[in-house]
Structure formats: C-alpha cells, structure tokens
Image: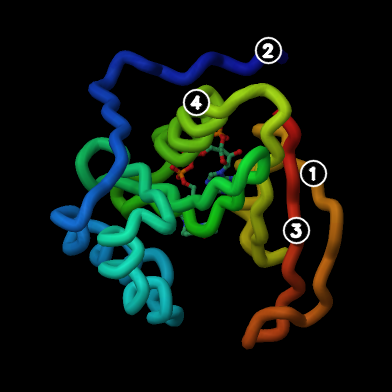
Amino acid sequence: MAKMPLPWCWPLTVRVAGPADEPVLADLLAASFPADTLPTMLLAEQLKRGSVRYLLINEGQGFLSYRQLFEEVEIYLLAVAPKARRQGLARALLEFLMGALPAGSRLLLEVAADNRPALALYQQLGFQVYHRRQAYYAQGQDALLMEKRL
Ligand SMILES: CC(C)(COP(=O)(O)OP(=O)(O)OC[C@H]1O[C@@H](n2cnc3c(N)ncnc32)[C@H](O)[C@@H]1OP(=O)(O)O)[C@@H](O)C(=O)NCCC(=O)NCCS
C-alpha cells in the first residue's frame, strides 16, 4: 500500500536554536533522556559556541542536534516532547535537515538497538546499519551505527 504523505496542514516551523532556547531544550532533554545528564551539561556551551547546531521544531515541541564537518553530518540527538509524539515531527526534522544539505552528504548516527521508535524512524528514512557495537550502553544494549548518503 502506498504511504500517505505527512499531513503538512498543521503549523510547522523549524529554526536554528540559540542561547535563549536553552531552557526549552533542557526541558526536552530531561523528558527524553532522563538518565543522561551529559547533554544538558554541555548544552549552554554548545549553544553559545555553535559547535553543535540545534534545530528546534514548533518552538519547543522537539529538536535535532548535529554537527557538520565538510560532507559528513553527525546527528547527535533527536527528541520530541512526549505529548507531541507520533505526529510526524521527528520525521519532519530529519527531512528538513536532509533537504538543506548538498547531494553527496553522508549522515551518521548512533542508536540503541532496543530503541524501536527511533530505529523504525531511521529505517523509514533510508538509514542503514553499517556497524554494531556489542553491549555499548550502560544497560548492556548494543549500539547500531547507521548512515545515509544523500
Ligand atoms: C524517536 C522519537 C524522536 C520519534 O519522534 P516522533 O515525532 O514521535 O516520530 P514521528 O511521528 O516523526 O514518526 C515517524 C516514524 O517513526 C516511527 N515511529 C515513531 N514512533 C514510534 C513508535 N512509538 N513505535 C514504532 N514506530 C515509531 C514510525 O515508523 C513513524 O512513522 P509512522 O507514524 O508513519 O508509522 C521520539 O519517540 C522520542 O523523542 N523518543 C525519545 C528520544 C529518543 O529515543 N531519540 C532517538 C535517539 S537520539
């Protein structure tokens, strides 16, 4: 069956976050990665220096962070507020990023092998696993390294 296009009828904004967005990003991090405080600790510095870029969707419903080094684009974190999930926002963030990058870019990311929502999303968008790190995370899950060439 053909996949239905996303319902682009709702208001959708994506913009690069700046230092003033730290509180909303910190809330999203706390809600989505409660066991991992490192990203929150690094947040202020990253926003100030612009070393890691944060794309914010709908003024705080979700974000994607990444770093671009020439043709390689490493996606670090992707999170959508629990109340706003399953509405296509994570997919919209990834599609926005992919649409802004030149052909030939290589997108890289890492995901826990048991993170079924994220894995399904990345597979849906054409990311492929190129390496598996056994028992990489503290709870013993494997890490899957995925890539997509534009
Ligand atoms: C993973 C996450 C970012 C997905 O965000 P989302 O906005 O709900 O995802 P979308 O609505 O764009 O979903 C797009 C596709 O992803 C997959 N997907 C998303 N959530 C899913 C779920 N709970 N179960 C199964 N598949 C899911 C589906 O293939 C979905 O397409 P469909 O709706 O046509 O079936 C969100 O669940 C989240 O923030 N999780 C916590 C943080 C996290 O694990 N981030 C990823 C690792 S950094």
What separation in Å lies between label 1 and label 3 (alpha carbons)?
8 Å
Question: Pointer 1 and pointer 3: residues touching (CB < 8 Å)?
Answer: no
Instruction: Determine if residue 82 is in view.
Output: no
Q: Calculate the distance from the C-alpha at mark 4 to the C-alpha at mark 3.
A: 22 Å
Q: Residue at x 61, y 24 (%)?
A: 102
Give SS at disc 4: helix
- 36 in relation to 13, above or below: below
The residues bearing labels 4 and 1 have C-alpha atoms spaced at a distance of 20 Å
Q: Name the residue under label 4.
A: 100
SS for callout 3: strand
Q: Is residue 16 visible?
A: yes
Q: Which kind of residue does numbered mark 2 sit on?
A: Ala
Name the residue beneath numbered marker 1.
Answer: 128
In the rendered image, the vertical position of residue 105 relative to residue 137, given as above or below? above
The CA span between labels 2 and 4 is: 26 Å
Residue labelled with disc 3 = 145
From the viewer's perspective, is residue 11 above or below residue 137? above
Q: Residue at x 35, y 54 (%)?
A: 50
2 or 4: mark nearer the eye: 4
Q: Crowding at label 4, few (<14), some or many (≥20) Cα neighbours within 10 Å?
A: few
